Image: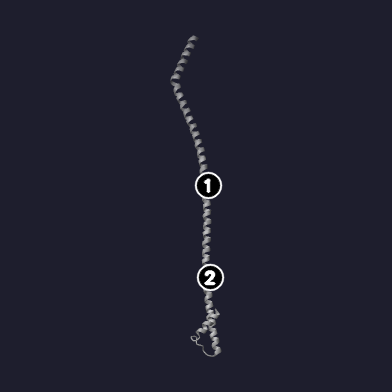
């Protein structure tokens, strides 16, 4: 065996192997590698977009929560204001109702006092007539002495 022939044949076989690899094996491998790189780059970009979207959503949710708390405090303030208005209205209506009851009671008392005074006058007049009739020992005619009774009644007022 000749060493030169062996070296040349091995070099020729190696060159053929290199040519075959570059021509048929290398392009599919490069395409697979490029597709994998693209997939990885797309995944990283999607991850960055997701992280950015998450930050935006977090900010938006904190803004919405802040607005909700503000609206809740406004609603509470309005409810407290309305409650105090209702209490004031109830106080006013109770005062009006109390005043009406008091004025009605005063009117009724005045009427009762007037009725009692009238009854007392009548009773006093009757007693005076009865006393006078006993003193005179004769019957006194009420019609005949109407003026006298009226003057007694006026004196009692």
Quick one: label 2 or label 1, which is nearer the N terminus?
1
Task: Say if residue 1 shows up in the picture.
Answer: no
Where is residue 44 drawn, in percent x and y?
50, 31
Disc 2 vs disc 1: which is toward the camera?
A: 2
User: Which residue is at the front of the view, 73 or 101?
Assistant: 101
The coloring applied to the image is: one colour
Where is residue 97 drawn, in percent x and y?
51, 64
Q: Determine whether the residue tagged by mark 2 lies in a helix, strand or loop.
A: helix
Q: Residue furthest bottom?
A: 137
On the image, numbered disc 2 is attached to which residue? Answer: 106
Q: What residue do we see at 54% from left, 86% from top? A: 130
In the image, residue 92 above or below residue 38? below
Q: Tag count in the figure?
A: 2
User: Which residue is at the front of the view, 120 or 54?
Assistant: 120
In the image, residue 65 above or below residue 43? below
Q: What residue do we see at 44% from left, 22% from top? A: 27
- Mark linked to residue 70: 1
In the image, residue 124 above or below residue 40? below
In the image, residue 140 above or below residue 37? below
Q: Disc 2 vs disc 1: Cβ atoms closer than 8 Å?
A: no
Q: What residue do we see at 43% from left, 20% from top? A: 24
User: Which residue is at the front of the view, 141 or 91?
Assistant: 141
Task: Say if residue 130 shows up in the picture.
Answer: yes
Binning the other alpha carbons within 10 Å of mark 2 as few (below 14), some (14 to 19) or many (20 upward) gives few
Q: What residue do we see at 52% from left, 68% from top? A: 103
Q: Determine whether the residue tagged by mark 1 lies in a helix, strand or loop.
A: helix
């Amino acid at each position: 065996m000749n060493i030169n022939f062996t070296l040349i044949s091995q070099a020729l076989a190696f060159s053929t192997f290199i040519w075959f690899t570059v021509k048929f094996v290398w392009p599919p491998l490069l395409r697979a590698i490029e597709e994998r790189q693209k997939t990885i780059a797309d995944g990283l970009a999607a991850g960055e977009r997701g992280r950015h979207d998450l930050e935006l959503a977090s900010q938006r949710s904190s803004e919405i929560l802040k607005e909700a708390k503000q609206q809740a405090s406004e609603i509470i303030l309005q409810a407290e204001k309305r409650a105090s208005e209702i209490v004031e209205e109830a106080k006013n209506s109770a005062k009006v109702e109390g005043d009406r009851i008091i004025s009605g009671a005063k009117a009724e008392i005045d009427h009762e006092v007037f009725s009692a005074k009238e009854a007392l006058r009548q009773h006093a007049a009757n007693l005076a007539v009865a006393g006078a009739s006993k003193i005179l020992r004769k019957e006194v005619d009420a019609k005949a002495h109407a003026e006298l009774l009226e003057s007694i009644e006026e004196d009692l007022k």
